[in-house]
Image (cartoon, rainbow, N blue to C red):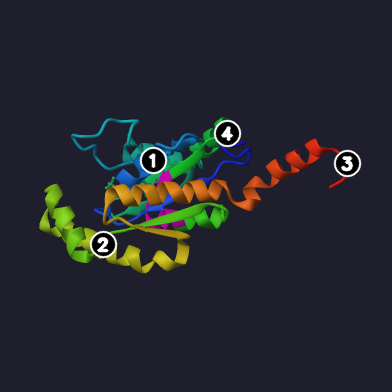
Amino acid sequence: MSAETGNVPLVLIVSGPSGSGKSTLVQKILELPGTMPSISCTTRPRRATESSGKCYDFVSEAEFEAMVARGEFFEYARVFGKYSYGTPKKWLEESRKRGLDLVLEIDVQGAAQVKEKLPESVAIFILPPSREELERRLRGRGQDSDEEMARRLAKARDEIAAFGKYYDFCVVNDDVERAGREAQAIVTALRCSSTRRRDRVQKLLASFGGKN
Ligand code: 5GP
């Protein structure tokens, strides 16, 4: 049960093209009490700025395949046709055990799988303000070759095209403070939805005694 609502915790999917600033907005959501992150496994090499177990659990191809064979992933996908990424089932179990809303930062292929298996999950798409701004941000990172840049922009286009299919909400990240408040507001509103407050209402009614 969720500590915040007394319900089964929310499963929140956050996706968006690389350069849309989704990691920053995920951090904003995680600032809300009652939330926890899902830590993905990936075969991508670790960047200098990353430590294992914080952003990702970095595993070898063989380890990843073994986890797939043991059915340990809730969803997994090959991203940019190069490296594998997956959400271990253990985070869903942990979120239910601890009563914390779970935040998954995954790509569109992953979002489609989660939505299929768990239709009550909620998907938020982070949109860059424009293509030019997205390219500027990607170039600003200075970590990608021209080839990689073209691949990221092409993937961004495909992801934006898939937006209408799986996503319940869309946040335009033109100003990180405002976009962060919007992302937090979405979670707050979900927690206040009448379906999620039903048990609470029943309990309150019961405390009045007599019949409903
Ligand atoms: P990066 O290598 O830049 O950290 O991530 C590349 C892409 O993989 C991003 O779009 C990110 O959201 C996505 N991703 C990260 N973890 C997962 C995961 O567990 N499953 C899926 N399907 N995608 C993931």
Q: Is residue 127 left or right of residue 46?
A: right
Magenta span of residues = 104-111
Query: Residue 144 at x, y = what percent?
Result: 14, 51
Provide residue 52's location: percent of width, then percent of height. Answer: 30, 31
Residue 211: image location, x then y, percent: 87, 45
Which residue matches tag 2? 129
- The residue closer to the viewer here, 186 or 142, is 186
- In the rendered view, tell whether residue 95 sits above or below residue 185: above
Q: CA distance from mark 3 to mark 1?
A: 49 Å
Q: Label 3 crowding class (10 Å Cα cut-off): few <14, some 14-19, many 20+?
A: few
Residue at x 46%, y 58% (from the top left corner): 112
Q: Element at badge 4?
A: loop
Describe residue 127's horizontal placement relative to residue 111 as left or right. left
Is the residue indicated by label 1 positioned so its CB lies within 8 Å of ligand 1? yes
Which of label 4 and label 3 is nearer to you?
3
Instruction: Give the labeled residue for mark 1.
Output: 40
Residue flagged by tag 4: what amino acid is it?
Ala
Residue kind at label 3, given as amino acid type: Gly
Which residue is drawn at the image coordinates 17% and 54% (left, top)? 138
Q: Earlier in the sequence, mark 2 or mark 4?
A: 4
Is disc 4 surrounded by few (<14), some (14 to 19) or many (20+) residues within 10 Å? some
Mark 4 vs 1, N-terminal side: 4
* 4 vs 1, front mark: 4
Q: Give the residue pinned by disc 4.
A: 3
Which image quarter: residue 53?
Answer: top left
